[in-house]
Amino acid sequence: DLNSRDHLTVVNNHGVDDLLQSRLTAKDLVMSVLKKRAAEVDVDRCEPGEEDAFYVADLGEVYRQHMRWKMNLGRVKPFYAVKCNPDPEVLRLMAQLGNGFDCASKSEIDLALQTGIDPSRIIYAQPCKTKSYLRYAQKVGVKQMTFDNADELYKIKATFPDAELYLRILTDDSTSLCRLSMKFGASMDVASQLLELAHHLELKVVGVSFHVGSGAEDPRAFLKAVQDARVVFDQAAEIGHELHTLDVGGGFCQETFEQFSGYLSDALETYFPPSVRIIAEPGRYYVASAFTLAANIIARRDVPDPLDPSRDAYMLYLNDGVYGNFSNIIFDHQHPVAKVLLSSADDSQPGTPSSAALENISYSIWGPTCDGIDVITERIDLPGLLNTGDWLYFEDMGAYTKCSATRFNGFSDNHEVIYISSETGASALLNY
Ligand code: PLP
């Protein structure tokens, strides 16, 4: 019950301390901070970029997701997938929560190590690694890593023969948003040959890993993957490897978590005794809902409504788009939903208590670059006539957004993040 929480902390100097005196829900708190920050900007006078899009990150939400994980998957230790959102405060919280890190490159390894964790809390979960990064992993003591092919085994033998290896196996990811198995994963036909080769090369295989695909829809994918992993564990034992860990990858999300974790827990209980350590690589699950993005309307164009040319519709141009934080539209197949944050229409109708009373108008919403692909929403009805300088906000913008933004057309790829925490547990861990 969020309403019962009376200690909310805002971590920034935007002067919102007064908001904390009242008992706010987490969502109220995020909205208050968004509004306060947006209202500080005067687009008629501000310096270039002061009206840039910005995030409010509620680390209390990350904390709640962690508690939910613990309740449902207590046996499975999360290694947060850094690629999903390498925000330094998120990483710091992950470290404080006792989580490990799934890293895919040298700089992700560096980011994880900068939190002060021991290198044994990192898995280099990229089956096709850069040689110089492998040497770097050896230098900094990151031993755990995945592989899925013979060439990689020879590379590891030559570069880092003491590494602790996880054989990544193929999964059925046909129902997932982002399919990964077309690129990575050894099929069950070749698993035992790879284990034989690793044994022959005197390499140490310690586990099996898989990933059911990011944004997976079918929880049975976990059951099949766990069954396949069991087969590989048995093959490995016959060959002479001593496997001790199963890595069940990522693919969890907010909406279906209880259902997915139910399938996974049952499968683990059936196929893997408690002596086997279980880890996972969740990304999206932890951060998607923790970040809300606010963007400014920089331009507007009056056009006939394509569905009813007798009516006006409007094209709105924001200062963020698919080449920026809305990269999730292209790379992660998401459909962010615009909501009105601050609108001059609210003030322009005397006696109008809220935007709910305003007439709905149809909009299409575009990013700031010159490219026609840079569209956020083809059509949406929003209350009132929005204007240049007004603000929109978008929830659930924490996963695969900022990390894949570009600087195309000279726009920023590094927008301000205002950190808040709606949970005392998170505030205490982060020293906020
Ligand atoms: N682990 C690996 C190897 C991945 O490739 C990914 C995402 O692409 C993840 C973990 C995180 O997946 P998710 O965000 O669906 O949890």
Image (cartoon, helix red, strand yellow):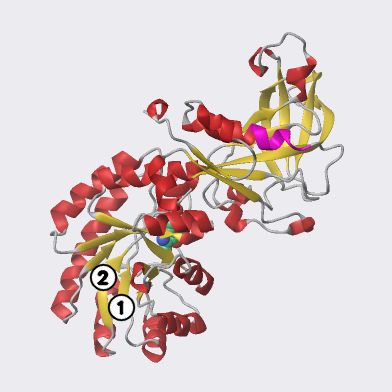
- In this rendered view, identify the residue nearer to me: 31 or 6: 6
> What residue do we see at 25% from left, 64% from top?
246
296 lies left or right of 164: right
| Picture quadrant where residue 235 is located | bottom left
Amino acid type, callout 2: Gly
Residue 344: percent from the left, percent from the top?
77, 24
> What residue do we see at 28% from left, 73% from top?
191
Q: Are marks 1 and 2 in contact (CB under 8 Å)?
A: yes
> What residue do we see at 36% from left, 71% from top?
118
- In this rendered view, identify the residue nearer to me: 162 or 311: 162
**322 in magenta:** no
**Nearest to N terminus: mark 1 or mark 2:** 1
Question: How many neighbours does mark 2 have within 10 angstroms: few (below 14), some (14-19), or many (20 or more)?
Answer: many
Query: What is the spatial separation of the Cα atoms under label 1 and label 2, in whole angstroms?
Result: 8 Å
Q: Ligand 1 sits in which quadrant? A: bottom left
Residue 55: percent from the left, percent from the top?
61, 44
Q: Which label belongs to residue 336?
A: none
Asked which secondary structure carries label 1, the reply is strand
62 lies left or right of 192: right
Tell me where the magenta segment starts and ends, as one range. Answer: 35-41
Amino acid type, callout 1: Glu
Residue 174: percent from the left, percent from the top?
40, 51
Q: Which residue is mark 2?
A: 207
Is the N terminus in the top left, top right, bottom left or bottom right quadrant? Answer: top left
User: Can see residue 331?
Assistant: yes
Single out the mark in the foreground, 1 or 2: 1
37 lies left or right of 79: right
Q: Which residue is mark 1?
A: 164
Asked which secondary structure carries label 2, the reply is strand
> What residue do we see at 84% from left, 28% from top?
302
Identify whether 320 is placed above or below 100: above
